[in-house]
Amino acid sequence: MHTILLVEDNEMNRDMLSRRLKRNGYDVVMAVDGDDCMNRLRSMIPDLILMDINLPGRDGYQLTREIKADSSTAHIPVIALTAHAMSGDREKCIEAGCDDYDTKPVNITSLLEKMMKLIGA
């Protein structure tokens, strides 16, 4: 079973997405902000991170840069999740180090396909 770290500050989004991922056979660990995310990464190495871009404090761009700059976590694939679907947003996520990008509301079929490409599950 693959472990997913879901970094999402919105409780409703966290609940909905975690239930869908669990139904599809994933173990889901949740973080509500940047500090929570980094604390979780000190005690576990997930197979993939789903990163909300619009977080309070350190945003998803900054967190992804920190994760990718650390040799112990740089290998973890990160998929950015954002309500922003403007021109250039995908590129901005990739520039920050994200391996892929998906928009909210999440299309679970599309997201699962992207996850499978990155972790082979």
Image (spheres, rainbow, N blue to C red):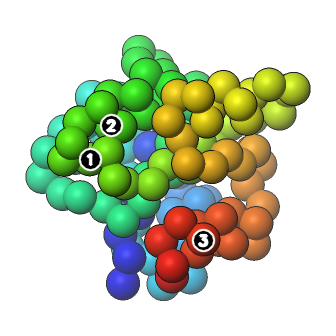
**Residue 116 seen from this side:** yes
Q: Is residue 121 above or below residue 107?
A: below
The reply to whether the C-beta atoms of the residues labelled 1 and 2 are less than 8 Å apart is: yes
Out of 35 and 15, give the one closest to the viewer.
Answer: 35
Indicate left or right for 54 with 57 as reference: right
Q: Residue at x 61, y 36 (%)?
A: 94
Amino acid of disc 1: Thr
> Disc 2 on helix, strand or loop?
helix
| Residue 15, x across and y down, in percent | 53, 57
Q: Earlier in the sequence, mark 3 or mark 2?
A: 2
Could you say which disc has been placed on residue 117 in the image? 3
Res. 82 image quadrant: top right
| Residue 25, x across and y down, in percent | 48, 84
- Label 1 Cα crowd, 10 Å radius (few <14 / some 14-19 / many 20+): some
> Disc 1 on helix, strand or loop?
loop
Q: Earlier in the sequence, mark 1 or mark 2?
A: 2
Could you say which disc has been placed on residue 67 in the image? 2
Amino acid of disc 2: Ile
Please identify the residue farthest to the right as the structure is shown. 87
> Disc 3 on helix, strand or loop?
helix
Res. 71 image quadrant: top left
Indicate left or right for 27 with 101 as reference: left
Q: Residue at x 87, y 26 (%)?
A: 87
Where's the N terminus, which quadrant?
bottom left
Q: Which residue is mark 1?
A: 73
